[in-house]
Amino acid sequence: LRFSITTSYSNFGIIPYGKSLKGRLYYDPNNIDGCSPFGDFDYNWNDTKASVYPIIVVKRGNCSFVKKVGNIERAGGKAGIVIDDKTENV
């Protein structure tokens, strides 16, 4: 199976040079756009030595990226992915 995903990225915070992040994707079907605070995810947020970190997926729209990122941070996400379902030249 081969596919490609067209992406662009933004940095909110500090990404150490040469580092990587392994994560598990989390999605809240009751908060698809991430514009509201998130409920509980099945993750031990207090495990500071975890080798797999939470990455929260949201859909684009209905509020600013800053609000989405703030909600992702407050929920304990180490990264966020914003899905855009419109065809655009990125």
Image: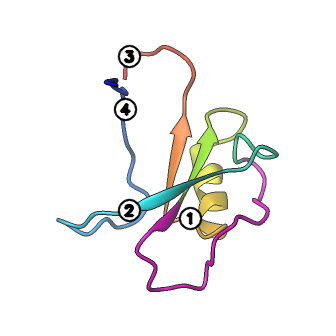
Instruction: Inspect the image, locate mark 2, and give the three-letter code of the amino acid beneath it.
Output: Lys
Q: Report crowding for label 1: few under 14, some 14 to 19, many 20 or more residues within 10 A (C-alpha).
A: many
Q: Marks 4 and 2, Cα distance to the nearest angstrom?
A: 18 Å
Secondary structure of residue under mark 2: loop
Residues under labels 1 and 2: Cα distance?
12 Å
- Disc nearest the viewer among 1 and 3: 1
- SS at circle 1: loop
Name the dominant secondary structure of the magenta segment. Answer: loop
Identify the mark nearer the N-term, 1 or 2. 2
Element assignment for label 3? loop
Label 4 environment density (alpha carbons within 10 Å; few <14, some 14–19, many ≥20):
few
Task: Report how far apart the C-alphas of labels 1 and 3 lie in the structure.
Answer: 28 Å
Residue 77's disc is 1
Task: Indicate the position of residue 19 as horizontal and vertical percent values.
Answer: 24, 67
Vertical comparison of 24 with 62: above or below: below
Determine which residue is flagged by label 3: 89
Q: Which residues are magenta?
A: 35-54
- CB under 8 Å between callouts 1 and 2? no
> How many C-alpha atoms fall within 10 Å of the one at disc 3: few (<14), some, or many (≥20)?
few
Contact flag, marks 4 and 2 (Cβ < 8 Å): no
Q: Is residue 49 magenta?
A: yes
Disc number lying in front (2 or 3): 2
Disc 4 vs disc 1: Cβ atoms closer than 8 Å?
no
The earlier-in-sequence mark between 4 and 3 is: 4
Which numbered disc covers residue 7? Answer: 4
